[in-house]
Image (spheres, rainbow, N blue to C red):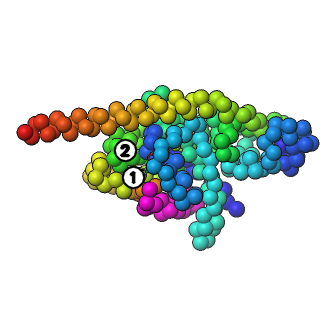
Amino acid sequence: MISSGGNLVVYSLDTIGIGDSTEAHLHFVEDHMFDSDQTFFFEHICILPNRYVNILISAIHDSLCVIFLDVTSEVRRIESMQQAGNELSLCKEQLGRLELELEKIRKDQ
Amino acid sequence: MIKKKICMVGVFAVGKTSLVQRFVKSIFSEKYLTTVGVKIDKKTLDLGKHCVDLMLWDLQGEDDFQSLQVSYLRGSSGYFLVTDGTREWTFDKALTLKEKVEEAVGKLPFMLLINKVDLQESWEVGNSKIETLVRSGWSVIRTSAKTGQGVEEAFRALAQKILEV
Ligand SMILES: Nc1nc2c(ncn2[C@@H]2O[C@H](COP(=O)(O)OP(=O)(O)OP(=O)(O)O)[C@@H](O)[C@H]2O)c(=O)[nH]1
Ligand SMILES: [Mg+2]
């Protein structure tokens, strides 16, 4: 994709509907990642507002392969559960604090 | 342009997203919207001698179900350990998180942020704890994503540290 200069049509990648240049989507990785022969996999990345992707960056022979997988709906599902769970945890923490305070007041009396 | 990746690490609801939003967009919201996975933002910082493009990776916080996913840290140049000054346990947790990060990516420039300093009436982290860390070489900054206190200073300081490496 990089060697295509962001021209997605060359590889029929325009059909994935992201619609921007490849570079625009890769602005978030450090340049040295492109030089390494390691494979990078990142899950649930939000690079555009309201769009989440899994990304695989891998060197294959002399070129670099970047795969985007749209996982927005999966993230939305996790999000509502996580939000509820974390709000509950915050409430429990607050309750713990209030209980401690109450105990202190009782002891002082 | 030099590009540097910085990660925001910390437990849930300490203010990682809010700090990035304050720094990048100068905005703050009281509403809590948890982050799933990672949100990436970018800001160019002029440090006098250099301009640097900061790639800010705002990671999902650790909670009861999900621990820090170290794979996100790959390729970073530095990180913030973010804690909530009104929830002492989030501060205590910073040590373990730092160990996890170092196990995964080795020693990197980092900075400890004690956030929500505007909430002095419910502040829990004692000065002696902070001083102990400072004496052992940690850089610690008290921040408020709400008022903006310490935020720009923290990002500048970490960027500077990274460039000096
Ligand atoms: N008063 C005050 N509230 C803050 C500050 N920073 C964040 N908050 C609030 O704390 C809550 C959590 O903030 P987030 O920025 O979403 O926290 P987070 O660390 O990104 O949370 P996760 O994504 O779930 O890990 C929100 O309700 C924010 O409004 C601060 O400096 N002062
Ligand atoms: Mg967040």
As helix, strand or loop, the secondary structure at mark 1 comes to loop
Please name whichever residue, B154 or B99, is drawn nearer the observer in this view of the structure.
B154
Q: Is residue B159 visible?
A: yes
Q: Nearer the viewer, mark 2 or mark 1?
A: 1
Callout 1: CB less than 8 Å from ligand 1: yes
Q: The disc labelled 1 sits on which kind of residue?
A: Lys
Residue highlighted by disc 2: B91
Q: Which residue is mark 1?
A: B116
Q: Is residue B148 magenta?
A: yes
Above or below residue A20? Residue A97 is: above
Along the line of sight, the residue nearer the viewer: B59 or A40 = B59
Q: Position of residue B127 (x, y in %)?
A: 28, 54
Q: Earlier in the sequence, mark 2 or mark 1?
A: 2
Q: Residue at x 45, y 34 (%)?
A: A86
Q: Chain of mark 2?
A: B
Q: Secondary structure at mark 2?
A: helix
Amino acid type of the residue tagged 2 in the rendering: Phe
User: In the visual, does B7 lie left or right of A42?
Assistant: left
From the viewer's perspective, is A49 left or right of B124?
Answer: right
| Quadrant containing the C terminus of chain B in the rendered view | bottom right
Toward which corner of the image does residue A104 lie, by quadrant?
top left
Q: Residue at x 41, y 31 (%)?
A: A88
Residue B18 in percent (x, y) is at 50, 50
Residue for point 34% across, 43% down: B87
Q: Is mark 2 within 8 Å of ligand 1?
A: no
The magenta stretch spans which residues?
B146-165
User: Which corner quadrant holds the N terminus of chain B?
Assistant: bottom right
Residue B85 location, x and y as percent?
A: 35, 49
Q: Magenta stretch: dominant SS?
A: helix
Instruction: Check if mark 2's residue and mark 1's residue have beta carbons within 8 Å.
Output: no
